[in-house]
Image: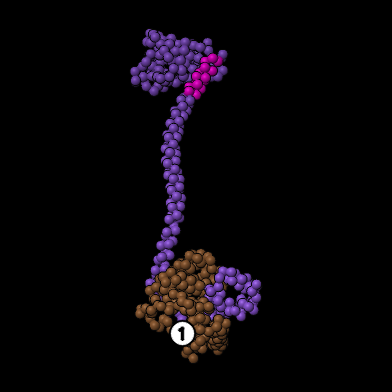
Amino acid sequence: MFALDEQAFTFGKFLTQMQDDALLIKQLQAKEERALSLLYDKYSGALYSVIIKMTRDEALSQDLLQETFITIWDKSHQYNPEKGRFYTWAYRIVKNKVLNYLRKNDILIQTDDLSVYENKEEPETINRNFLELNGAITKLDAHHQKAIELVYFKGLTHREAHAQMDVPLGTFKSYIQQALKQLRNTYTKIVVVLLLMIDVM
Amino acid sequence: MMTKKELLENGLLEQYVLGELDAKQNEVIEKLLKSDAELKAKLEDIESSFEELAIENAILPPDSVKSGLLSKIKIADAQISPKDSNNSRTWLGIAASFAAFFLLGSIWLYSELNTVKEDLRIVGDQNEALQKDLDGITKNYDEVSKWYAALSNPDAEQYILKGNALAPEAKIVSFVNHRNKSVIINAQKLPNLDAEHDYQMWADVDGEMINMGVIPKDAKLMAMTYIDDAESLNITIEPLGGNDHPTVERLISNVYLD
């Protein structure tokens, strides 16, 4: 029950964040520093996690996170809420930035089988906990979990990831779709539980 | 043209959210999303699942990243703003020029005002002096007119009083008007007296001397009191301020009226 409470709390917090975003984004686009500061507070953790899992380098991740928010600040006018969520837009900026950096510095070495990091030694500075996954994804089947990890947290394309997992592309796509479906169910259950709790209260 | 079914089966929405697609594919999907509410709802599910996944896995970055970010943005703003500050400096310059112009203008106007005030004061003084002159002239004119009217009056009869042995050089011209009942004399040729004495004029009515008044020492023409039925006009020397009764011993002149 405690775990559920925690999840409900997380999701409640998440719902609140969603509601406030529209206003915050308008303020961001009007170049209000306060809005950038609040959006940073909400999303920097999620984005930092993605960057760390992609680069496996904390110092570099911090630089890239800062650069990402500078891009968000400079290009805020390019974000269109009708095309998708703010977080999705920010995630794409992060992914492009990290992949560009890795390519430019030859850290990302693409081999014939399109796997990445093949020749890269893991830096010792990284906190191992930062590479572990938490929450609903840990309840997924191992291959679903892996598929999501590759495309989402490691920034691989479907095409690269299916090669890495050594399954056909179609199979890999269905892994992703099923994984997302299960995640969706888990998150929806949280909403239902949350609503029930509100009813009970 | 891609159909909705193909789009869903190929997992293109997931790849769209992950930013894997090229610009052309993105454009096609965005077009479909605009017209298809079901597709849009599906996209939102995928987006929020990824977002929740990310939030559940959030790692708190060190505070230095945020402080660095905010100070970099301030520096960037400061670099953009020189144009602004230049601009505002220009405006400030223009404003200062105007202020200086108005200040100088005000000083000039103030000095002009003082000059005009001084001129006005002088003109006022002159005006006052002229008014005084005019008053004097008018007064003189009235006086002269009055004397002239009296003297030129056809009813005025002229009598000349000549000095006797006591004052041989004395001569007084008098104008008696019985109609107006007025007596005017010209005492220009009366010898000067000492400070303790005055000339006084008397009318003789049936042997009694009646006072017509003391003759002022500084006037040339003067009106005396007209006395009915006067037989003669007489002038005596009396103590200063005149006397109740004439000092006959000091009579200097007389004339009989017709």
- Front-lying residue, B203 or A179: A179
| Residue B242 position in % (x across, y down) | 40, 21
| Residue A112 position in % (x across, y down) | 48, 77
The residue at 43%/72% (across/down) is A102
Determine the colour of chain A. Answer: brown
- Front-lying residue, A61 or B12: B12
| Residue B139 position in % (x across, y down) | 48, 24
Q: Tell me if A8 is positioned left or right of B118 in this view.
A: right
| Residue B75 position in % (x across, y down) | 41, 62
Q: Quadrant of the N terminus of chain B?
A: bottom right
Depicted B22 relative to depicted B96: above or below = below
For the question of whether residue B129 can be seen, the reply is yes
Q: Total label count?
A: 1
Q: Tell me if A190 is positioned left or right of B31 in this view.
A: left
B142 in the magenta segment = yes
Residue that extends furthest to the front in the rendered view of this protein? A112
Which residue range is magenta in the image?
A: B137-153
A52 in the magenta segment = no
- Give amino acid for label 1: Asn
> Residue B239's quadrant in the figure?
top left
- Front-lying residue, B20 or A110: A110
Q: Which residue is mark 1?
A: A134
Q: How is the image coloured?
A: by chain
The residue at 44%/37% (across/down) is B113
For the question of whether residue A191 can be seen, the reply is no
The residue at 50%/83% (across/down) is A165
Q: Which chain is purple?
A: B
Depicted B62 relative to depicted B193: above or below = below
SS for dot 1: loop
The residue at 56%/18% (across/down) is B179
